[in-house]
Image (spheres, rainbow, N blue to C red):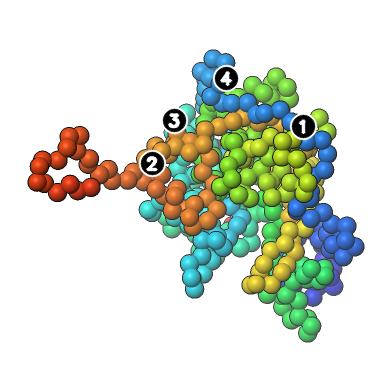
Amino acid sequence: MQPFELTRHLPGADVDLLQRYRFDLAGFLAFRDALRAGACTRAASAFQGDLQAPRPGDVAALDGTERALQERGEAALAAGQVAVVVLAGGMATRFRTAGGPTPVKATVEVAPGKSFLQFKLEDARAAGRRYGRALPFCVMGSFATLPGRNGIERHLVERGLWGGDIVLFAQRISVRLTPQGDPFGARSDGGPLPWESYTTPGHGDVFAALRETGVQSLLARAGVRVVLLSNVDNLGATVDPRLIGLFLEREEACGAAILAETVARQMADGTQVGVVVRADNRLRIVEGFRVPDGTDPARLTDAAINSFCLSLPALAQPISLEVHAVEKLVGGIRSLQGETIACEATALLPMCAVRVPREGRPGRFSEGRFYPVKSLPDLERIRGLLVPQPVRWVPSVPPYAGSPSGSSSTATSGATPAFQRNR
């Protein structure tokens, strides 16, 4: 990709930034042309097809095999066959305080002194200590979240969290468009595009980013077979050997490449959930807000999506996800951006689903697995579950007569990861 090609199609664009973060010019132009022709798939009507689907299984009802699955998952962990991949490319727009800057979501504190990223890293490291092998902890950031004074890399270093088990890699970069298909923020004098013009192509870009940055090859050389994939703000996606064992069993029995964790969808889940449907004789997950208008809800398996176990060898094949036009308000102005959705890989790879426990009780956080944190009210509620609340004493007998009745770098790092050194 030559600089003159970029400047010809995107006057005022930061060429160095686009090249550093692997801008896909051909894909961008195809998206722009489809948008201008009215042929681009909008996010509200992405799925068409037969919507019959079986209910997911239940991790709590595994016909007496739970111990065997636990042992199989533990063996995979002890053999160094498991890696954690965290999607942390987003800015925390919904967590911004009045008048304050927009923080990087991964660095937002979900408990006193503990960020989203730290919470997930400590869980992976605890599993590594328990089973005697460091788990590779791979974080996909973006042009906006990896570098800089408030970025992910500096956050890890300054908190003393950096180590050889961490691998940072970057997703690609894209450019927002106006509803008419012109570059968002473009100036008539050809001046520089503002920072708000740049965006990321969605979490589905993880499949391309793993290959392009060499992380997929790095993990394969280290003997990794299973990848635990989740968003940085999905705190229930912890390392559970039962689920790893179940995935390996399903992979062996029926060739499953993905095991999706689900819970029964509730109205309060809003748009942060998905549904399981059937397409082309395979189960598929689409996000809740992308279910087509007019779909009979009775024909859907309602399921909120938590996280995935994926087969690393299966991810070696190119996974070309559909690009959808997603409308965003940027500074109060309408913009359109092309996004791919990670859930759509379930239309291309054989997938099975499993029900998992929802939330635990205050102070018993680990009893549940579904903790997406998408807003400030979510954050306050999760903090209440993470931090034990003071218990008010209530007398077991009536009060005495007369007493008061009272009443939360852009590619792989240069250091040799600990999970490689241990081999």
| Residue receiving disc 2 | 362
Residue 130 numbered mark, or none = 3
Q: Residue 53's quadrant in the figure?
A: top right
Give the CA separation, mark 2 to mark 3: 25 Å
Residue 179, percent from left and from top = 79, 68
* Direction from residue 401 to residue 260 in the image, left or right: right
| Residue receiving disc 4 | 62
Looking at the image, tell me whether mark 1 or mark 4 is earlier in sequence order. Answer: 1
Image point 71% across, 28% down: which residue? 54
Residue 103, percent from left and from top = 52, 63
Give the class, few, some or many, for how many residues have Cα within 10 Å of label 4's Cα (few <14, many ≥20): few
Q: Amino acid at mark 4?
A: Leu
From the viewer's side, name the closer residue of 269 and 422. Answer: 269
Question: Which residue ends up furthest to the front in the rendered image?
Answer: 401
- Quadrant showing the C terminus: top right
Looking at the image, tell me whether mark 4 or mark 2 is earlier in sequence order. Answer: 4
Question: Which residue ends up furthest to the bottom in the rendered image?
Answer: 189
Q: Amino acid at mark 2?
A: Pro
